[in-house]
Image (tube, grey):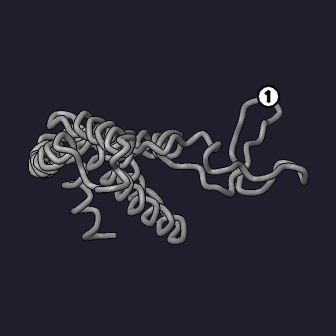
């Protein structure tokens, strides 16, 4: 019994360390400070009075959120005893899950559009519209040529197909499904 308890505690400690070192984004009010041995650490107060906060884009946080780190963050909340830190962690998890969902949906939509040929049709439409405007008679009629008029409905049909098929692609993403299941449980208690 005690070995199981010890294993569970070690796993939670590992997840908490993972949360702190990998998953937790550095805020825009963080400072990158070297310690005495030259290792870098982050602080919410400046290392010296001349140092300015790190810009959000330069913080070392890539902006890319993954499901494994978010699940580790959710597990780390249970270890936090300080209510203020815990609430901060919960808020960060909610916002990071929203970012993850948006990224996953955008990726799936992009894959579906590529599969349906939307980027190529958009390129053809731009080129055809440019050719229409270059025509000397454009100012007289200001309408699409036959080629441009044929591309538009094909592009609309490809976009509709991509929208329908993107929902099916999102359902096949195992990480997304695992995270959303864990997140729905997390929301019940936090």
State the residue at coordinates (50%, 48%).
24
State the residue at coordinates (43%, 39%).
14
Q: Quadrant of the N terminus?
A: top left
Question: Which residue carries the number 1 mark?
Answer: 37
In front: 117, or 136? 136
- Please state the horizontal and vertical placement of residue 123, each as a whole percent of the image: 30, 36
Q: How busy is the neighbourhood of tag 1: few (under 14 within 10 Å), some, or many (20 plus)?
A: few
Q: Quadrant of the C terminus?
A: bottom left
Taking the view exactly as shown, the residue that stands out farthest to the right is: 49
Q: Is residue 167 visible?
A: no
Q: Is residue 181 visible?
A: yes
Which quadrant of the structure image shows residue 154?
top left
State the residue at coordinates (23%, 43%).
108
**Helix, strand or loop for disc 1:** loop
Taking the view exactly as shown, the residue that stands out farthest to the top is: 37
Question: How many marks overall?
Answer: 1
Q: Is residue 169 left or right of 144 when viewed as pictured?
A: left
């Amino acid at each position: 019994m005690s070995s199981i308890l010890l294993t569970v505690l070690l796993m939670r400690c590992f997840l908490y360390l993972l949360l702190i070192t990998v998953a937790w984004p550095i805020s825009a009010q963080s400072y990158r400070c070297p310690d005495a041995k030259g290792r870098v650490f982050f602080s919410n107060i400046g290392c010296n009075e001349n140092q300015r906060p790190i810009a959000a884009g330069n913080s070392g946080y890539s902006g890319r959120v993954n499901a494994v780190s978010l699940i580790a963050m959710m597990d780390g909340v249970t270890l936090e005893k300080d209510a203020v830190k815990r609430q901060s962690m919960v808020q960060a998890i909610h916002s990071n899950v929203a970012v993850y969902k948006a990224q996953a949906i955008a990726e799936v939509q992009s894959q579906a559009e590529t599969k349906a040929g939307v980027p190529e049709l958009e390129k053809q439409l731009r080129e055809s519209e440019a050719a229409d405007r270059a025509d000397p008679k454009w100012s007289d009629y200001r309408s699409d040529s036959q080629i441009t008029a044929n591309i538009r409905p094909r592009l609309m049909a490809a976009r509709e197909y991509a929208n329908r098929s993107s929902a099916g692609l999102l359902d096949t993403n195992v990480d997304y499904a695992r995270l959303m299941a864990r997140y729905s449980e997390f929301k019940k208690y936090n």
